[in-house]
Image (cartoon, rainbow, N blue to C red):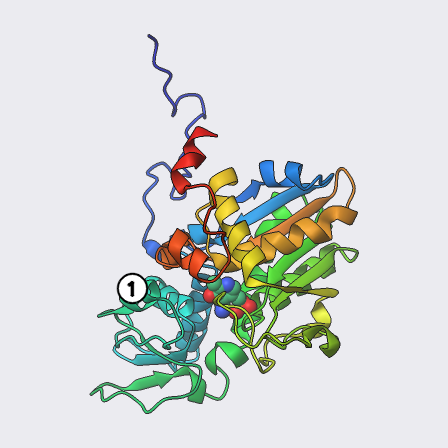
Amino acid sequence: MQVRKYGRKGRCRIRRVNGDTGILPNILSAIGNTPLVKINNISKSAGLKCQLLAKCEYFNAGGSVKDRIGLRMVEEAELEGKLKPGHVIIEPTSGNTGIGLRAGHAAVKGHIRCSHRQCQEKNEFGEGVDVVLNGYRILPLPKVNKPLAVFPFCVKASGTYRNPYNPVAHYDTTAEEILEQCGGKVDMLVAGAGTGGTITGISRKIKEKCPNCQIIGVDPYGSTLAAPSELNVTNISYYEVEGIGYDFVPTVLDRSSVDKWYKSEDKETFIMARRLLREEGLLCGGSSGTAMSTAVKAAKELKEGQNCVVILPDSLRNYMTRFLSDSWMEERDFLAKDHKAASEWWWK
Ligand code: PMP
């Protein structure tokens, strides 16, 4: 049997970044330039005519879209002289920003703490690493004998909810990549909002180049980010999906940059996240399911030849004990008890 080899005649599948060697100068170079992947099976079963495309942010070095802003906020704080080696960073985060800061700037020392609502995986990931994370509110400062570079207290560089470099990171990188990958033609973009930095930054750039592109925001029931506010009326007060939704509107979320909001429920979110794994091979997290389950509804109005881009913010790595677990899904009635066992997937 003849074995075909990659790497000949330009067929190498490995992205070569640094001249001939393929060696990255450091891990920061593995942030950004994430793949845009065509969604085939889910798109077909939804009967979509347009091209459905997933921006896979879990390919970033720290496993999420937040690596981009971690890097950018640190670099800008360094340029302003506010952050120096040995400083401690304190940042309110749901987990991914902290992991991103850690992955993106391991030279900045500190400690880690995650807010309690987050899943075990994010907490464990944070144990014993270098960046300080606190909950949504500013907690008592940890006792450290080091200078503190505390983002929430800095005038200009103030927490991801207010730091202008959060949306700017997406304006400068995520949106540019999407435009390039789509050959400059983006007809619809779908994303959830936590701080809102992703959707705001991407929208601002894409609207400059494709003014007719529809920007679709997704907000879980139980959160109040969607507009108009009547959309948020519900009996649901709690949701399981992480990283999106709040009961206040963060400063960096410019709701005028969103053309239309959809509300989402946990069940459709997690079923879709599992389908993305099973039917498309995408190892993405729960909020990716939220965005994709909305995209298959919103993109029904698009025609052949049009592009709908969906942001998949993080990785399945964070949720192994959550929506990937059948019992976790069953306990919450997201999956019927008599559903087909996971092992049957392989025989389909
Ligand atoms: N999904 C996940 C898993 C996240 O961690 C975040 C960040 N909070 C988002 C979506 C939303 O990103 P943004 O804060 O830019 O709105």
Q: Is residue 325 visible?
A: no
Estimate how packed mark 1 is, as few (under 14), some (14 to 19) or many (20 or more) residues with alpha carbons within 10 Å.
some
Instruction: Report the residue at 54% width, 81% height from top.
Output: 162
Task: Examine the rendered structure and indicate whether residue 19 appears above or below residue 226.
Answer: above
List x then y, in percent, for residue 104: 36, 63
Asked which quadrant contains residue 138, the reply is bottom left
Task: Examine the rendered structure and indicate whether residue 276 appears above or below residue 252.
Answer: above
Most extreme residue toward the front, as rendered? 338
Task: Say which residue label 1 marks.
Answer: 125
The N terminus sits in image quarter: top left
- Residue nearest the viewer, comparing 249 with 159: 249
Q: Please indicate whether residue 185 sits to the left or right of residue 41 in the image.
A: right
Q: Please indicate whether residue 255 sits to the left or right of residue 143 in the image.
A: right
- Residue nearest the viewer, comparing 108 with 324: 324
List x then y, in percent, for residue 70: 42, 68
List x then y, in percent, for residue 156: 50, 84
Q: Amino acid at mark 1?
A: Phe
- Residue nearest the viewer, comparing 194 with 91: 194
Asked which quadrant contains residue 268, the reply is bottom right
Most extreme residue toward the bottom, as rendered? 140
**Helix, strand, or loop for circle 1?**
helix
- Residue nearest the viewer, comparing 236 with 71: 236
Task: Examine the rendered structure and indicate whether residue 175 appears above or below residue 183.
Answer: below
Q: Is residue 166 visible?
A: yes
Instruction: Report the residue at 32% width, 38% height from top.
Output: 21
